[in-house]
């Protein structure tokens, strides 16, 4: 319950702020974006490792996933088939799944949008998949240069997706709030006539680079 409360508080901030606040780590590949710019998601990761062009493990995963989980799927960047569509979306909603992160393509985009289910992916494909190959659930997966462990907290918005280890939630929440407070101060000082060069201490760097 403590982690859920911390994650809920952290979800009030943007993914970029969370990423910066935890030391510029945890960002998933920047090619993964929401189907619509208003989609947002947060929750613990339920990870799935699937074979490109096969979605059997997604059907299996939805038998085991818990309400509030975010389904995080490594489809190996495969773009020539959409292992996720409207039928799986309806089932995910019925299970209380918070959203989907797909390292690959999906299909039935209009139907998914109309259902209001948050989906983050690399793009769309009209092609379907087989349902024959084994895979793994709730194992560490890697998307971009970020390893996502089962239970890591996922935060996604229009900018992208970031993962936060559950044991770091409290520290990252504090750091994110501090960063937001600093940036709020910057905005006010800029309105009063200051500038980013002085606020960020960039004059010495500019001098060293001999910029005119």
Image (cartoon, rainbow, N blue to C red):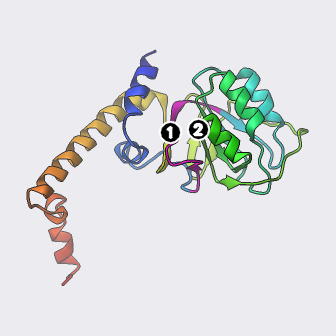
Q: Residues within 10 Å of mark 1 (few under 14, many from 20)?
A: many
What residue did someone put label 1 on? 40
Q: Position of residue 129 (x, y in %)?
A: 85, 46
Near-viewer residue (93 or 66): 93
Residue furthest out toward the left: 192
Total label count? Answer: 2
Whether the magenta-drawn stretch holds residue 120 is answered as no
Q: Position of residue 192 (x, y in %)?
A: 8, 56
In contact (CB < 8 Å): disc 2 and disc 1: yes
Along the horizontal axis of the image, is 130 left or right of 91?
right
Vertical arrangement, residue 129 with respect to residue 174, above or below: below
Query: Mark 2 falls on what kind of element?
Result: loop
Along the horizontal axis of the image, is 138 left or right of 175?
right
Numbered mark located on residue 118 in the image: 2
Whole-angstrom CA distance, mark 2 to mark 1, is 6 Å
State the residue at coordinates (58%, 29%): 98
Q: Position of residue 76 (x, y in %)?
A: 72, 51
Residue furthest out toward the right: 132
**Residue extent of the magenta highlight:** 31-46
Q: For residue 141, what is the image quadrant?
A: top right
Residue furthest out toward the bottom: 212
Q: For residue 99, what is the image quadrant?
A: top right
Q: Which numbered disc, 2 or 1, marks the residue that appears first in the sequence?
A: 1
Q: Residues within 10 Å of mark 2 (few under 14, many from 20)?
A: many
State the residue at coordinates (79%, 57%): 80
Query: Mark 1 falls on what kind of element?
Result: loop
Along the horizontal axis of the image, is 84 left or right of 35?
right
Q: Position of residue 23 (x, y in %)?
A: 37, 46
């Amino acid at each position: 319950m403590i982690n859920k409360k911390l994650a809920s508080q952290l979800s009030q901030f943007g993914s970029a702020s969370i990423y910066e606040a935890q030391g510029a780590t945890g960002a998933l590949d920047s090619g993964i974006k929401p189907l619509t710019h208003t989609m947002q998601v947060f929750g613990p990761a339920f990870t799935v490792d699937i074979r490109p062009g096969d979605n059997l493990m997604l059907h299996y995963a939805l038998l085991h996933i818990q309400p509030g989980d975010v389904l995080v799927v490594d489809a190996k960047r495969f773009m020539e088939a959409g292992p996720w569509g409207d039928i799986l979306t309806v089932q995910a909603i019925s299970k209380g799944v918070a959203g989907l992160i797909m390292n690959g393509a999906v299909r039935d985009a209009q139907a998914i949008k109309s259902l209001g289910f948050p989906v983050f992916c690399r793009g769309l494909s009209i092609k379907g998949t087989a349902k024959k190959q084994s895979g793994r659930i709730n194992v560490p997966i890697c998307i971009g240069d970020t390893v996502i462990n089962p239970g890591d907290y996922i935060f996604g918005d229009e900018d992208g997706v970031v993962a936060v280890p559950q044991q770091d939630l409290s520290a990252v929440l504090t750091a994110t709030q501090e960063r937001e407070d600093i940036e709020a101060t910057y905005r006010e000082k800029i309105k009063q006539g200051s500038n980013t060069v002085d606020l960020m201490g960039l004059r010495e760097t500019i001098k060293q680079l001999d910029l005119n």
